[in-house]
Image (cartoon, rainbow, N blue to C red):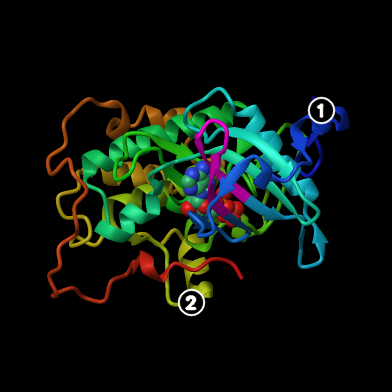
């Protein structure tokens, strides 16, 4: 069984943990690639091929100690959250867990298409129809989490994975490393997440809520549709200021051909007061998401215009993304 501790982390009962965590070497069971598929702030993820079946997985290696601090509680939490999210295709599935003296290895369902970020890196943004398709799936995943009082707290294109290469038809949420269980009575205040996507209440050290994810969804919609990050500035302090004031602009050259419904969706999600922010179910009801209207413009992932007459952009290209030190 699982229990939630006061800091919003899930614990797994000792007896259960023993059956979940395998102490044999992962290398006895899988062929693990040397070059990683991806890297996050804490983990290295490599392709792992199950020797007996030939099935491909993604092995997430996480150090048990970081900056001389024990990370087991956080890693067990991530494992527990993934175990609780096993009956949805919108969350990457956990297959097995291995433990060595220094590392925990989470053997995950492989998302062969890698990060959604990679598509943005190639083409700068998605076409509106593609962005809406992606957003509907992301909302599905987040609705599943919020129904279980799980706040992801790190929704961004690096943590959204594509099951198939170069296709947004099957998107999966990953990385529950800083997620929290927000049950009644649990109050979490923490500086976490990634600068560009973080909500105002996180910066002002107010309690984190499920709606903290809704803010990130708004930022995500902005990024997918334009290829630009709405609040990013040259330095972190300015970014924080832009976020706390919700200093939002839609530069015409970045949103050329984007429908007013899509822009309204972004504005709807980016409300500074977390109590006034919509709930996930409200976002499903937003016309951009709910209506079956077709959207002008290309269905394919396209590059934004390369014209040069752009004034100093208020929003900053994704390449300038920074994360907390
Ligand atoms: P971190 O907590 O360090 O950010 P993540 O779980 O986000 O770790 O994994 C880091 C990166 O590894 C991801 O951004 C992605 O590029 C890649 N990755 C993670 N899980 C998978 C997976 N199941 N399939 C394919 N790539 C993955
Ligand atoms: Mg990550």
Q: Which mark is residue 235?
A: 2
Q: Is 271 placed above or below 67 here?
A: above
Mark 1 vs mark 2, foreground winner is 1
Q: Which one is in front, 182 or 26?
A: 26
The segment highlighted magenta reads 45-60
Residue 107 location, quadrant: top right
Marks 1/2: CA distance? 46 Å
Cβ atoms under marks 1 and 2 closer than 8 Å: no
Residue 20 location, quadrant: top right
Image quadrant holding the C terminus, namely bottom right
Q: Under tag 1, what secondary structure?
A: helix
Q: Under tag 2, what secondary structure?
A: loop
| Residue located at (56% from left, 22% from top) | 87
Residue 154 can be seen in this image: no
Sequence order check, earlier mark of 1 and 2: 1
Residue carrying label 1: 16
Instruction: Classify residue 104 as left or right of residue 128.
Output: right
| Residue located at (16% from left, 55% from top) | 256
Q: Which one is in front, 146 or 201?
A: 146
Instruction: Classify residue 114 as left or right of residue 58.
Output: left
Dominant secondary structure, magenta: strand
Image location (x, y in percent) of residue 81: 66, 35
> Tag count in the figure?
2
Residue 21 location, quadrant: top right
């Amino acid at each position: 069984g699982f229990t939630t501790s006061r800091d919003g982390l899930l614990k797994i009962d000792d007896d259960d943990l023993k059956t979940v965590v395998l102490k044999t070497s992962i290398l006895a069971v899988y062929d693990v690639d040397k070059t990683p598929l991806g890297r996050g702030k804490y983990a290295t993820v490599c392709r792992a091929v199950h020797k007996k079946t030939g099935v491909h997985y993604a092995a997430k290696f996480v150090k048990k100690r970081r900056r001389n601090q024990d990370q087991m509680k956080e890693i067990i939490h991530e494992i527990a959250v993934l175990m609780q999210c096993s009956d949805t295709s919108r969350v990457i599935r956990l297959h097995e867990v291995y433990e060595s003296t220094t590392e925990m290895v989470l053997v995950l369902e492989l998302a062969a298409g890698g990060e959604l970020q990679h598509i943005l890196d190639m083409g700068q943004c998605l076409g509106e129809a593609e962005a809406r398709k992606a957003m509907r799936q992301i909302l599905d995943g987040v609705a599943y989490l919020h129904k279980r009082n799980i706040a992801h707290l790190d929704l961004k294109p690096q943590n959204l994975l594509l099951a198939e290469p170069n296709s947004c038809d099957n998107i999966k949420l990953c990385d529950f490393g800083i997620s929290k269980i927000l049950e009644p009575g649990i109050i979490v205040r923490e500086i976490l997440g990634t600068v560009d996507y973080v909500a105002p209440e996180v910066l002002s050290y107010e309690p984190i809520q499920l709606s903290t994810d809704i803010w990130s969804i708004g930022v995500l919609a902005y990024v997918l549709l334009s290829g630009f990050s709405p609040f990013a500035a040259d330095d972190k302090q300015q970014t924080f200021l832009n976020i706390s004031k919700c200093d939002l602009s839609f530069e015409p050259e970045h949103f050329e051909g984007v429908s007013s419904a899509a822009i309204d969706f972004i504005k709807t999600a980016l409300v500074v007061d977390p109590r006034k922010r919509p709930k996930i179910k409200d976002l499903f009801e937003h016309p951009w998401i709910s209506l079956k209207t077709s959207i002008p413009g290309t269905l394919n992932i396209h590059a934004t215009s390369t014209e040069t007459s752009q004034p100093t952009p208020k929003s900053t290209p994704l390449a300038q993304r920074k994360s907390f030190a």
